Amino acid sequence: MSDLRRRKVSSGSDQERKTKTSEVYKAKSTVVVLELSSVLCIVFGVLIGSLLCGPWIHDIVGYCLGYRWDFVNKCIMESPNENGYGTDFCRIPVDCDICKDVHKIDEIHVSELSVQLFEERYAYSDRPLVVRNATLDWKAMDTLNYYWFKEQYLSDPEILSYKHEDCWFNKYGTKEFRNLASVFRLNEDRIKLKDNKPWYVGWAVCHTDVANNLYSLYSRPSFINPDSTPPSKPWIFIGSPGHGANIHIDNVDLSSWQAQITGIKKWFIQPPPECSRKCGNTMEITVYPGDIIVLNTNVWFHGTLVLGSQLSLVLTNEYD
């Protein structure tokens, strides 16, 4: 009797194993068919996920916006271009109200620009302005040139060896200008424009003796409030026709005035890319000896090109 039970149980177990084996076989033999629309949805989802989560999403967003956005620090990244023009920093987006109604650069003769008018309309509004014939009474107009600076800087070997964080220098793509000392080693043909190799350079006058001698040659422009801080830490930009500064934006403390001492220079001024939908296009204006351009270079992209047949020499100061 017990043998019969064992045979019955064994028979039942064998039947169960056969049933499970059959089910497994059927499962393995089953072919799942997906509709084409489902496959496309899956592929599309994978692609979108890869784009949104991939490292190149920042590049795609930057291309669409026209600038590179730092998602961590919430600022716009600026960096030098392939030729070394520009400054490496991260800036706060500009308030586009400064440029929404600016379609040209205003021009006013110095005799028509009072301190009050300048402060009410231009000084703190970031509106670009060219003041004509503003520096004709400066001693600098008859004195400042390449040779004046060369004499000043070579008068004492310690002047050019002075190092400080305020001693800004930019060679603007002129390869032979490694430092300020190399500027004053130019041969006469380059200085007198007898060759076809244009050059351009800018630097901050951080050397006390040179700065003090320079201050004696110019004064605060007549339209600047006499109670404002006296001119300090001047910058010099000098170069030959055919060269200048590529379009860029600065990272300095304040707005500035830039006096054209010699030569002719064309300016190109355009709103920052974050304001491209609200503001106009690039504006151009030419300045001549005696003119001053007032510009907040922290909010306006700007570039220059030296024109004419003389060296361009520009004296620059910030104002508050």
Image: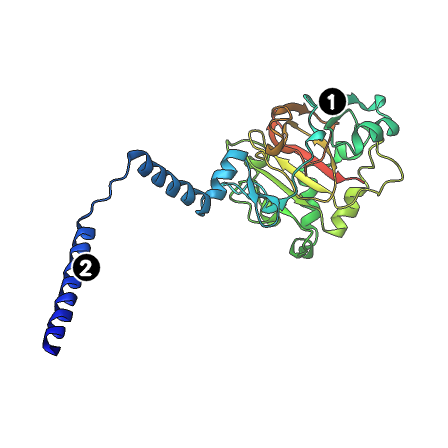
Image quadrant for the N terminus? Answer: bottom left
Marks 2 and 1 sit apart, C-alpha to C-alpha, by: 90 Å
Side (left or right) of 260 relative to 12: right
- Residue 273 position, x and y percent, is 59, 33
Q: Which mark is residue 191?
A: none
Name the quadrant containing residue 36: top left
Q: Secondary structure at mark 1?
A: strand
Name the residue nearer the viewer: 283 or 98.
Answer: 98
Which numbered disc covers residue 106? 1
Residue for point 84% across, 42% down: 230
Colour setup of the view: rainbow
Which quadrant of the rendered structure holds the C terminus? top right
Check disc 1 and give the amino acid type. Answer: Asp
Please indicate whether residue 206 sits to the left or right of residue 67 in the image. right
Q: Secondary structure at mark 2?
A: helix
Q: As drawn, which residue projects farthest toward the bottom? A: 2
- Looking at the image, how many numbered discs can be counted on the residues? 2
Q: Position of residue 135 (x, y in %)?
A: 79, 29
Residue at the spot 14% in from the left edge and 62% down from the top edge: 15
* Residue 20: mark in rendering: 2
Question: Residue 169, relative to residue 2: is it above or below?
Answer: above
Mark 2 burial class by Cα count in 10 Å: few <14, some 14-19, many 20+:
few
Q: Position of residue 228 (x, y in %)?
A: 86, 40
Side of 292 where 184 appears, left or right: left
Q: Amino acid at mark 2?
A: Lys
Task: Assess whether mark 1 and mark 2 are in contact (beta carbons under 8 angstroms).
Answer: no
| 122 with respect to 88 (left or right) | right
- Would you identify the image quadrant in which residue 145 lies? top right
